[in-house]
Image (cartoon, grey):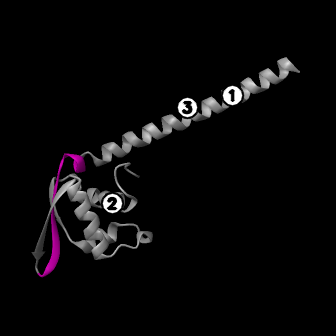
Amino acid sequence: MFNEKLSKRENEVMGAVFSLSEGKERFLVSPYELLAVLPGRSNFDEEKLERALRALELDGYFELVFTDRKGEKTYCVHMREAGLAYRRQEILRRRSLSARLMLAAVCGILSAMLGILLKLLLA
């Protein structure tokens, strides 16, 4: 899934945050829980994760408060409207992409048929 407004890393982090939220508007999550959900190939560390979280916070996806839970660094996440609508945007983007691919395929088939028809008529 890829949202056009987000970079690849931000999109991966937002997907992880959304999946850990389980539909809740407010929840607690540790950096290690987020890193465990992120794809292994993305090579995230805590610093890169924190930068991506800050960027998403600035974009209005959620509010982020750093807390300490039993000596462990924890994020208190409060999802905003854009964050709650993240999955819906992804579904709409996929529909739009599949519609464009179908249109391109239909146009390709029609142009090939027109070319064959013109070739037969002019030969």
In this view, the residue in front, 37 or 113, is 113
Amino acid type, label 1: Ser
Q: Position of residue 81 (x, y in %)?
A: 19, 46
Q: Residue at x 22, y 63 (%)?
A: 54
Looking at this view, name the residue that lies furthest to the right: 123
Determine which quarter of the picture holds residue 93.
Answer: top left
Looking at this view, name the residue that lies furthest to the top: 121
Depth check, mark 3 against mark 1: the one in front is 1
Q: Secondary structure at mark 1?
A: helix
**Mark 2, other Cα within 10 Å: few <14 / some 14–19 / many ≥20:** many
Nearest to N terminus: mark 3 or mark 1: 3
User: Residue 79 magenta-drawn?
Assistant: yes
Depicted 12 relative to depicted 41: above or below: above
Q: Position of residue 84 (x, y in %)?
A: 23, 48
Q: Position of residue 78 (x, y in %)?
A: 14, 56
Q: Position of residue 58 (x, y in %)?
A: 21, 57
Q: CA distance from mark 2 to mark 1?
A: 40 Å
Nearest to N terminus: mark 2 or mark 1: 2
Determine which quarter of the picture holds residue 94.
Answer: top left
In this view, the residue in front, 58 or 96, is 58
Q: CA distance from mark 3 to mark 2?
A: 30 Å
Q: What span is in magenta?
A: 71-84
Amino acid type, label 3: Leu
Q: Residue at x 11, y 76 (%)?
A: 68
* Left or right side of 80 for 89: right
Depicted 85 relative to depicted 53: above or below: above
Q: Which residue is mark 1?
A: 111
Q: Quadrant of the C terminus?
A: top right
Q: Which residue is mark 2?
A: 10
Nearest to N terminus: mark 3 or mark 2: 2
**Mark 1, other Cα within 10 Å: few <14 / some 14–19 / many ≥20:** few
